[in-house]
């Protein structure tokens, strides 16, 4: 009957693109409606994309490993009939080919001005500017180092570099015939004359050359008994985001030790009945999350993000929880609207997210819109840690292992020495917008809520 375009579906409000991991069907295969056609990776989650309707896979438009924007066509399905409708796909290619020829003859001036605009560079680097994952992927593929990326003018909000900006820049650089490493020194001056100001860009050449050498480092030979392991997709993403976070946010960490004896005793007497009733474990983490939520209500300026010179204050309290996967990688599912849940609701939601994370069944929405993150390093036996902030958040807390310690206990009859259960809280925060007073008072307030936990709490 007709050819139907299959497009990259929208898999979450904040998801703007996805990476094609694997095609489960090949050209010529018959596909039933809602049958999985390909696997797509979006922000650490691998999702199978079903067919919008039955038919034959006529053409694959996007190859494995490519990043595709939401709504862009990825394949063509033949829903019935012969190959007569096939020209619909090439027709899109013919239009841009014939149009430029007409424009070249009618408006030669505009054709020559387009590359000149993309060759312009900012006079000063836009340090600390936000870059979308799509832009960063394109930059890595084209060998554009961060020092060079910061000089590219952006037409997006707050001067952000859009996909079109970086593609135009890449196209112009290729048209100039300049190699990737030499492109930055040649294009730093904003003026059309690129030969006269040549000494000015020289300080930029060293970082770019170093970045180029670093990318080729794995090709070197290694002496000794070593094993070279290629990073998987998720590890590459984690690596890039951690580097970006340290570059963007000046990290400061404050530490507080909390007496959690009441919590330990309460859980010990409650966990068996809870498991029998709910069929799942009762851990300490929901109690920590509840205390963090209460502290965020007291100090709402922790629940913010930074956009240029603007502070975005979040009304929703969405808590991200770091979960270790069997592969050794880390993923951060989100408990949305945690302030609207009781302790039992937080516990059930947390167990559901953690279980689905370990079997790779999370959706992109499960990872979106976190406003504050907690990492339980105590589950690995660590006493404390200095966690790295999840961008664009401004703070993250690590809770350490609970240890028995001798402590002074104040009683009406006098001070006594007793055994208590203690735990360290580590609070890392972005010093651009969170000063030591706010960051320190926040973690102290969390500890206060934990120490004041009511041992008669019902769940």
Image (cartoon, rainbow, N blue to C red):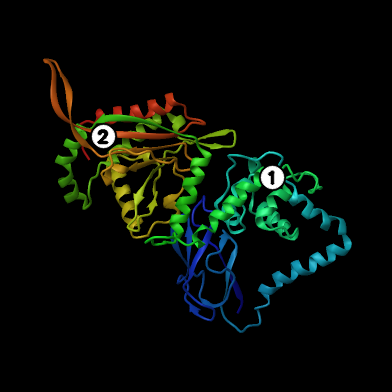
Q: Residue at x 75, y 60 (%)?
A: 175
Q: Which label's residue is closer to the chain start, 2 or 1?
A: 1
C-alpha gap between disc 2 and disc 1: 52 Å
Pick the quarter of the image with the C terminus.
Answer: top left
Instruction: Identify the residue under disc 2.
Output: 423
Residue that protrudes farthest toward the bottom in the picture: 82
> Is residue 224 visible to us here?
yes
Tell me where residue 216 sits by quadrant: bottom right
452 above or below 99?
above
- Count residues near mark 1 (Cα–Cα under 10 Å), then give few for <14, some for 14-19, many for 20+: some
239 or 296, nearer to the observer: 239
Q: Nearer the viewer, mark 2 or mark 1?
A: 1
Q: Position of residue 350 (x, y in %)?
A: 32, 47
Q: Residue at x 71, y 70 (%)?
A: 93
For label 1, the SS is: helix
Rendered image: mark on residue 202 = 1
Tell me where residue 170 sits by quadrant: bottom right
Q: Residue at x 23, y 51 (%)?
A: 280
Pick the quarter of the image with the N terminus.
Answer: bottom right
Task: Name the side, left or right, on which 328 lies relative to 420.
Answer: right
- Count residues near mark 2 (Cα–Cα under 10 Å), then give few for <14, some for 14-19, many for 20+: many
Task: Name the side, left or right, on which 323 lies relative to 84.
Answer: left
């Amino acid at each position: 009957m007709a050819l139907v375009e299959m497009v990259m579906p929208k898999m979450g409000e904040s998801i703007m693109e996805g990476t094609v991991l694997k095609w489960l069907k090949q050209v010529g295969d018959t596909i039933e409606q809602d049958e999985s056609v390909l696997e797509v990776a979006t922000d650490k989650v691998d999702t199978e994309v079903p067919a919008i309707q039955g038919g034959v896979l006529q053409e694959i438009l996007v190859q494995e490993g490519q990043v595709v924007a939401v709504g862009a066509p990825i394949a063509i399905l033949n829903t019935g009939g012969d190959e007569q409708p096939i020209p619909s796909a090439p027709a899109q290619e013919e239009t841009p080919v014939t149009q430029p020829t007409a424009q070249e003859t009618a408006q030669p001036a505009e054709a020559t001005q387009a590359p000149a605009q993309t060759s312009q560079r900012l006079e000063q680097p836009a340090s600390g500017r936000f870059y979308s994952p799509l832009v960063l992927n394109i930059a890595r593929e084209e060998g554009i180092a961060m020092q060079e990326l910061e000089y590219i003018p952006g037409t997006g909000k707050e001067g952000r570099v859009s996909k079109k900006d970086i593609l135009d820049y890449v196209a112009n650089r290729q048209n100039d015939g300049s190699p990737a490493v030499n492109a930055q020194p040649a294009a730093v001056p904003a003026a059309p004359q690129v030969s006269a100001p040549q000494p000015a860009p020289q300080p930029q050449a060293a970082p770019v050359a170093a970045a180029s050498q670093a990318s080729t480092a794995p090709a070197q030979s290694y002496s000794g008994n070593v094993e070279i392991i290629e990073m998987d997709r998720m590890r590459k993403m984690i690596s890039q985001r951690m580097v970006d976070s340290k570059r963007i946010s000046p990290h400061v960490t404050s530490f507080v030790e909390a007496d959690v004896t009441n919590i330990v005793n309460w859980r010990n007497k409650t966990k068996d009945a809870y498991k029998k009733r709910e069929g799942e474990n009762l851990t300490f983490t929901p109690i920590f999350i509840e205390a963090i939520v209460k502290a965020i209500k007291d100090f709402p300026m922790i629940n913010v993000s930074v956009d240029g010179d603007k502070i975005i204050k979040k009304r929703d309290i969405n808590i991200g929880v770091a979960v270790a996967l069997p592969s050794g990688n880390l993923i951060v599912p989100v408990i949305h609207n945690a302030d609207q849940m009781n302790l039992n609701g937080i516990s059930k939601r947390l167990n559901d997210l953690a279980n689905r994370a370990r079997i790779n069944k999370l959706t992109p929405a499960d990872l979106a819109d976190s406003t504050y993150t907690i990492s339980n390093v105590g589950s690995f036996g660590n006493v404390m840690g200095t966690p790295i902030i999840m961008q664009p958040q401004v703070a993250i807390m690590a809770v350490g292992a609970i240890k028995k310690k001798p402590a002074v206990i104040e009683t009406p009859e006098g001070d006594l020495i007793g055994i208590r259960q203690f735990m360290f809280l580590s609070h890392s925060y972005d010093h651009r917008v969170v000063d030591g007073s706010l960051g320190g008072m926040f973690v102290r307030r969390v500890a206060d809520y934990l120490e004041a936990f009511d041992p008669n709490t019902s769940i």
